[in-house]
Image (spheres, rainbow, N blue to C red):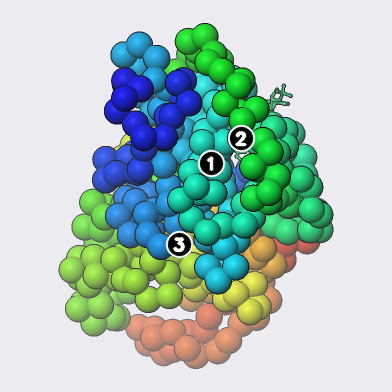
Amino acid sequence: MKEKDFNLNDGNVALRPIAGGDAEFLQRIWHETSDFEPNYIGPLAKAKKFVEKNAWNDKRKCFIVHLTQDDLTEPVGAVTAYWYDQRFGDIEVGTDIALRWRALGIGTRAKRLLIAYLFRAFPVHRVTGKTATDNEPARRSLEKCGMQLEGVTKKQYIRNGEYVDRAHYALLREDWEGLRETWKLEGNIEPLTPSVSDDIEPEFLLVGEKVQLRPVEPEHLGFVTEVFSHRFTYLDQELVSEDGLKSDYEKDNDDPVCGACWGKKHRVFLIESHEGVPVGVVGLWNYDKRNLSVEVGTMILDEKARGKGWGTEAKLLVMDYAFKSSPVERIYAGTNQYNRAARCSLSRSGLRLTNLIAGIHEGRRSPSGAALYDITRDEWLNEREVPDA
Ligand SMILES: CC(C)(COP(=O)(O)OP(=O)(O)OC[C@H]1O[C@@H](n2cnc3c(N)ncnc32)[C@H](O)[C@@H]1OP(=O)(O)O)[C@@H](O)C(=O)NCCC(=O)NCCS
């Protein structure tokens, strides 16, 4: 990339507005490991939709970070400005640098370019940044942009199953005026080489010993339709058609991202063998944000893949994901009282039988009951009892 290709650059680092082709890169950096931020955010379709609809508008401006050295064309990160309060010109900035390019000063340089652009182009009087209190690189980088710590909010979000505190920083326009010349004086740096030499491929999967889980992408909907039509034989087939699922997937209801398969209410994964062959579907369904509860459901379609503990492991993986990445307090599940395989799998996943409700499933001879199971966050993290087979 050449320096002159960019409006925003400091001689080494340059920013350009995000474009359609950046979704893969964005999804990659969202999922690269960080000890400080949750690192499992969803399907590529989510990144695509974000780039298409939410990455560049009146509320948000997302830039891709490049280095201007040599013929290096690969992007090295992304910085975003988000208008919290349009009336009072309160804008937050966020930075994600690709793993192999971290700790080389790029995050700080990119953020400074963004901050300078915001103060020059908009009637902004403060630019803010926030991060987990233990995210030392992010805090140092914010401080090196002149930001002052304004306070710490306790237990702000969940990471690895525990609430973490968040540090809030801000830079006022008048303070930036005093800093902008010193930033310029810091001058050019030598060409950079990656801090991590091997190109580590990020894993977009939840991986267990027997199976791996992949967030459902639009191209999987044919398979999901097949799974659903086996699972819900009593349903009107219209409800489980591929077209129906496609329109659900795209639905914008209260969630602009991937409607019914990956959004505020549902997180649906394909269950795959380690060779990448899909054998079923597991989901966290109907997240209830008032009661902080969600339903787990699994369906193994391939007969040959049943009875091997794959469904149980899939459930364990999504439940762990739910408890560690969101404030879910309770996960529940229900099945036909005579479905022994499902009941065994539920108790092997650590869920407890809480209720038997008579006569609500259509049976061949007479209605059968439903067996209801659940587990709380506390039990999952501290005192889960898993019965032997
Ligand atoms: C946080 C992040 C944006 C910082 O960008 P960066 O380019 O890696 O950081 P810089 O090289 O500009 O370094 C900034 C400061 O942090 C320090 N730092 C960098 N990595 C560090 C580490 N692993 N541990 C401690 N300090 C570290 C640097 O030494 C530098 O301080 P110094 O000049 O006083 O020595 C980047 O590491 C990143 O994308 N991390 C993952 C995503 C994330 O956490 N984003 C922030 C969410 S709010």
- Do labels 2 and 1 touch, CB within 8 Å? yes
Instruction: Tell me the kind of residue under disc 3.
Output: Lys
Q: Position of residue 127 (x, y in %)?
A: 62, 52
**Does the Cβ of the disc 2 residue fall within 8 Å of ligand 1?**
no
> Would the CB of label 1 be found within 8 Å of ligand 1?
no
Q: Amino acid at mark 1?
A: Ala
Q: Which comes before the other along the chain, label 2 or label 1?
A: 1
| Disc 3 CB within 8 Å of nearest ligand 1 atom | no
Q: Quadrant of the N terminus?
A: top left
Q: Nearer the viewer, residue 151 or 23?
A: 151
Labels 2, 1: front one: 2
10 Å crowding of disc 1: few (<14), some (14-19), many (20+): some
Using the numbered discs, state the Cα–Cα distance from disc 1 to disc 3 in whole angstroms.
Answer: 18 Å
> With 246 as the anchor, is 83 left or right in this view?
right
Secondary structure at badge 2 equals helix
Depth check: give the residue in front, 170 or 258: 170
Q: Quadrant of residue 46?
A: bottom left
Q: Secondary structure at mark 3?
A: loop
- Classify residue 339 as left or right of residue 43: right
* Residue 250 drawn at (x, y percent): 29, 66
Q: Position of residue 262 (x, y in %)?
A: 41, 60
Image location of residue 253, percent across then percent down: 37, 76
- Please name the residue that numbered disc 1 is placed on: 116
Tell me if residue 226 can be seen: yes
Nearer the N terminus, badge 1 or badge 3? 3
Q: Which residue is mark 3?
A: 59
Give neighbour class at mark 3: few <14, some 14-19, many 20+ (Cα, 10 Å). some
Q: Which residue position is annotated with label 2?
A: 180
Residue at 65% in and 27% down: 182
Against 211, residue 49 (above or below) is below
